[in-house]
């Protein structure tokens, strides 16, 4: 708690929140949450002020545990940080009860009309608190370095189900009142709530799927390997510490692939391909149960400690379940995307460091391929330097010794030195070279060499196509093969080539979001208008920023394309989360 978090007003060395008791009423008509947040605090310095984070919250009243009404100051709002809430307390205050309501435009909350859901009959609400959006629906100390336990009582319209990042009841309550309990301490960005027409299917005693009834059967089929993933993860890096591991499939407007809320991953329906080919995302969110949820980045400057470790861990789960050839393809594709990101950033861009300086900036600026993929390849580089067995033993020890704690980059590097490098100058200076990875730009010259036998076969097919020869229908290709094939083509193709490819492989009709997005990007740059209907349908039905950003970006490259993008965006924007609109608004301005 001694590390300064530049994205929070909290002063945890003076007063720190240990527990939250939450009571909320969900009002779909007003697009508002109303209720109370009772904070149990530890007044370490006998302070007379409690400093909290809030953004666009209406604070009605605050009571102290002695029954007195507390004075409070809601300071002027600062862009993206919101307003500091200063509560005047007493040296012996143990609890603070805040009665409040959210704004209809709260950035963490996505209110969906029935038409915006898969079922089309009931409204839907979900939250997205990462990085610093929890403060838009909760008054709290919104910093990843501060952990607390919580209970919740949520009242929603009868017939709907409320779920939180906690112990949940899996049955529908006709009266619409749900209670949740999170006995393990979590940081604020892992606070989550979802309310909608949901049902549950259990795989076993500790894992299952929540989804809208119309989506449930497809989701159950798609994620059938979920229990195996949990077992595989435990075999790699130790026991799962959170009790249950469930997945909630959200409506398509969810802005991310997934969000690793403890006990219940929120997931995009875009990974339901019908052939279980995109389940790596579930492995990623599961891996967060160790890297991120269990051992957390202390500040958003250290974000790579969450995501780099998780992508590495995900790759190990996928290799364990689906084989080395499968994971080698994913690794080569990731390396290609990372190199593209670094090239776009420029060779000396400080945002290509693993450790970032995000002071004065929205921490969302740090959520790029750098944290995820450069972080993963740094860890892969260490594995290759010391050997997998030694590296795995180190990681098991790391997770065990830092469980339910936060850590900074400097602290991790110190731990790496003491417990793995152990003064070996040759290992540090010629193989691992951690400082140039963490504090230097771009990709170091000891970037791991990655190779895929399977993708070499794709290279041969690409060569055949580029030579103008007929390409035979490949057998047994996975999503990885097809994405690699499309990325290996020129940025644009003549219309006759596009039409020929489409007629043979039916790309425009693909139900696989990864393949379709890649094809639509190529179609935009090739001015292949036969894909326009599919493009508009995709952009108006999917809210995942990973797909929206490259497609709108490609459209915005020409005046004609930008006009088309603006017309589509006008229809699509009401169904996007603020995380996505923040990116696209800037792009199409």
Image (tube, rainbow, N blue to C red):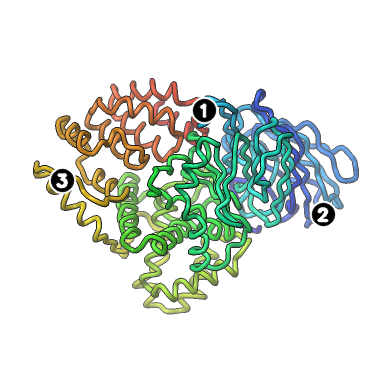
- Tag in front: 3 or 1: 3
- Looking at the image, residue 44 lies above or below residue 419: above
Q: Is residue 463 left or right of residue 209?
A: left
Asked whether disc 1 touches disc 2, contact meaning CB atoms under 8 Å apart, the reply is no
Q: Position of residue 497 (x, y in %)?
A: 15, 34
- The residue located at (37%, 66%) in the rendering is 381
User: For the residue labelled by badge 1, is the local secondary structure a helix, a strand or a loop?
Assistant: helix
User: For the residue labelled by badge 2, is the local secondary structure a helix, a strand or a loop?
Assistant: loop
Q: From mark 1 to mark 2, how far is it between C-alphas?
A: 50 Å
Q: Quadrant of the N terminus?
A: bottom right
Residue bearing mark 1 = 116
- The residue located at (52%, 33%) in the rendering is 578
Q: Of residues 52 and 400, which is closer to you in this image?
A: 400
Specify the label residue 249 is tagged with: none
Residue bearing mark 3 = 472
Residue bearing mark 2 = 46
Q: Residues within 10 Å of mark 1 (few under 14, many from 20)?
A: some
Q: Residues within 10 Å of mark 3 (few under 14, many from 20)?
A: few
């Amino acid at each position: 708690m001694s590390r300064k978090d530049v994205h929070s007003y909290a002063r945890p060395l003076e007063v720190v929140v240990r527990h939250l008791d939450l009571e909320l009423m969900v009002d779909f008509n007003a697009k508002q949450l109303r209720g109370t947040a009772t904070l149990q605090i530890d007044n370490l310095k006998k302070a007379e002020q409690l400093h909290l984070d809030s953004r666009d919250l209406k604070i009605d009243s605050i009571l102290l545990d002695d029954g007195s009404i507390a004075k409070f100051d809601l300071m002027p709002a600062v862009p993206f940080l919101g307003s500091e809430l200063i509560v005047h307390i007493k040296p012996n205050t143990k609890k603070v009860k805040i009665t409040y309501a959210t704004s209809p435009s709260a950035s963490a909350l996505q209110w969906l009309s029935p038409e915006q859901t898969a079922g089309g009959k009931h409204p839907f609400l979900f939250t997205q608190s990462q990085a610093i959006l929890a403060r838009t629906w909760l008054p709290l100390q919104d910093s990843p370095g501060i952990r607390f336990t919580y209970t919740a009582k949520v009242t929603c319209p009868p017939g709907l189900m409320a779920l939180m990042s906690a112990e949940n009841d899996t049955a529908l309550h006709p009266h619409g009142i749900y209670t949740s309990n999170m006995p393990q301490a979590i940081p604020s960005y892992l606070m989550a709530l979802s309310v909608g027409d949901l049902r549950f299917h259990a795989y076993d005693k500790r894992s299952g799927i929540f989804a809208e009834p119309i989506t449930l059967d497809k989701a159950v089929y798609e994620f059938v390997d979920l229990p195996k993933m949990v077992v595989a993860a435990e075999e790699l890096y130790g026991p799962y510490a959170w009790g249950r591991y469930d997945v909630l499939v959200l409506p398509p407007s969810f802005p991310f692939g997934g969000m690793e809320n403890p006990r219940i991953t929120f997931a995009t329906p875009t990974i339901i391909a019908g052939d279980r080919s995109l389940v790596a995302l579930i492995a990623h969110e599961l891996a967060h149960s160790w890297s991120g949820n269990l051992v957390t980045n202390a500040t958003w400057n250290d974000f790579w400690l969450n995501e780099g470790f998780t992508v590495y861990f995900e790759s190990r789960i996928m290799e364990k379940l689906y084989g080395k050839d499968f994971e080698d393809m994913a690794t080569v594709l990731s390396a290609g995307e990372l190199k593209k990101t670094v090239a776009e950033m420029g060779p000396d861009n400080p945002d290509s460091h693993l450790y970032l300086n995000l002071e004065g900036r929205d921490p969302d600026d740090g959520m790029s391929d750098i944290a995820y993929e450069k972080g993963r390849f740094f860890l892969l580089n260490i594995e290759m330097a010391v050997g997998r067995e030694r590296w795995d033993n180190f990681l098991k020890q790391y997770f065990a010794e830092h469980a339910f704690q936060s850590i900074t980059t400097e602290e991790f590097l110190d731990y790496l030195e003491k417990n793995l490098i152990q003064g070996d100058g040759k290992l540090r200076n010629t193989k691992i070279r951690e400082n140039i990875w963490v504090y230097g730009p771009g990709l170091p010259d000891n970037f791991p060499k990655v190779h895929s036998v399977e993708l070499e076969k794709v290279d041969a097919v690409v060569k055949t196509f580029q030579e103008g020869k007929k390409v035979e229908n490949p057998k047994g290709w996975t999503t990885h093969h097809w994405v690699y094939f499309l990325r290996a083509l020129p940025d644009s193709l003549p219309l006759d080539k596009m039409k020929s490819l489409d007629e043979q492989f039916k790309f425009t009709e693909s139900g696989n979001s990864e393949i379709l997005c890649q094809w639509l990007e190529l179609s935009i740059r090739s001015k292949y208008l036969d894909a326009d209907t599919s493009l508009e349908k995709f952009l108006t039905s999917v809210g995942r920023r990973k797909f929206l950003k490259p497609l709108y970006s490609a459209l915005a490259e020409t005046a004609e394309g930008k006009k088309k993008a603006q017309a589509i965006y006008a229809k699509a924007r009401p169904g996007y989360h603020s995380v996505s609109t923040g990116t696209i608004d800037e792009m199409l301005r």
